[in-house]
Amino acid sequence: MKALLQRVTRASVSIGNEEVGKIGQGLVVFLGVASGDTEKDAQYLAQKIVNLRIFADEEGKFNLSALDINAELLLVSQFTLLADTKKGRRPSFTEAAAPVQAEELFDYFVEQTRATGLKVATGRFQAYMQVEIHNDGPVTIMLDSSEKF
């Protein structure tokens, strides 16, 4: 499972003309579910993300987590994080989980992040979405649950 985090001052996700999710200061999390991922991967990433110290303290140092500042989270499923571009010019997505498994694990990840008490908004699984992001920093970090040990 891969997560691309972007620290934001605000962000929203729309489908067509309908805004389906919106947050203030916090993190946009693009989540890609790979074949073989489990609930343990989702638990690990959810805890890692909310506890990762990537928000500045009074001295401008990265000492505060999303939990520390009561950040908001916008979670967007994005299978393209699993793209394999080693061969040719067209990415392969064979590492991505099948849609049914991916949706189940994405929903479980959403549950895990909501259980922290933070405000959580989402896009819609398998929908064509427009994401508006107001980067803060910018700060962008990639996490991979396969690298947890």
Image: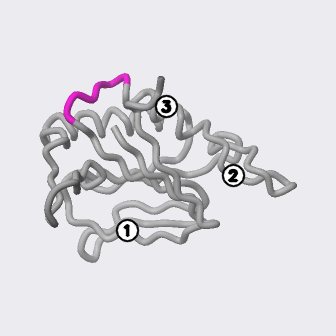
In this rendering, the label closer to the viewer, 1 or 3: 1
Query: Tag 2's secondary structure?
Result: strand
Q: Position of residue 105 (x, y in %)?
A: 27, 34
Pointer 1 with pointer 3, Cβ within 8 A:
no
Q: Residue at x 38, y 53 (%)?
A: 30
Pick whichever of labels 3 and 2 is earlier in the sequence.
2
Pointer 3 with pointer 2, Cβ within 8 A:
no
Q: Quadrant of the N terminus?
A: top left
Q: Judge whether 81 appears above or below 105 on screen.
A: below
Query: Tag 1's secondary structure?
Result: strand
In this rendering, the label closer to the viewer, 1 or 2: 2
Q: Quadrant of residue 34?
A: top left
Q: Residue at x 57, y 63 (%)?
A: 8
Question: What residue is shown with label 1?
Answer: 131
**Amino acid under label 2?**
Phe
Pick whichever of labels 1 and 3 is earlier in the sequence.
3
Residue 4: in magenta span: no
**Amino acid under label 3?**
Ala
Q: Position of residue 103 (x, y in %)?
A: 22, 40
Q: Judge whether 141 appears above or below 117 on screen.
A: below
Q: Position of residue 143 (x, y in %)?
A: 46, 42
Q: Residue at x 55, y 52 (%)?
A: 72
Q: Residue at x 47, y 27 (%)?
A: 148
Seen from the viewer's position, the closer of residues 84 and 45 is 84
Q: Which secondary structure is most common in the magenta stretch?
A: loop
Label ID, residue 115:
3
Q: Judge whether 116 appears above or below 121 on screen.
A: above
Question: What residue is shown with label 2?
Answer: 55
Name the side, left or right, on which 116 lies relative to 109.
right
Q: Position of residue 113 (x, y in %)?
A: 47, 37
Marks 1/2: CA distance? 22 Å
Name the side, left or right, on which 57 lies relative to 44.
right
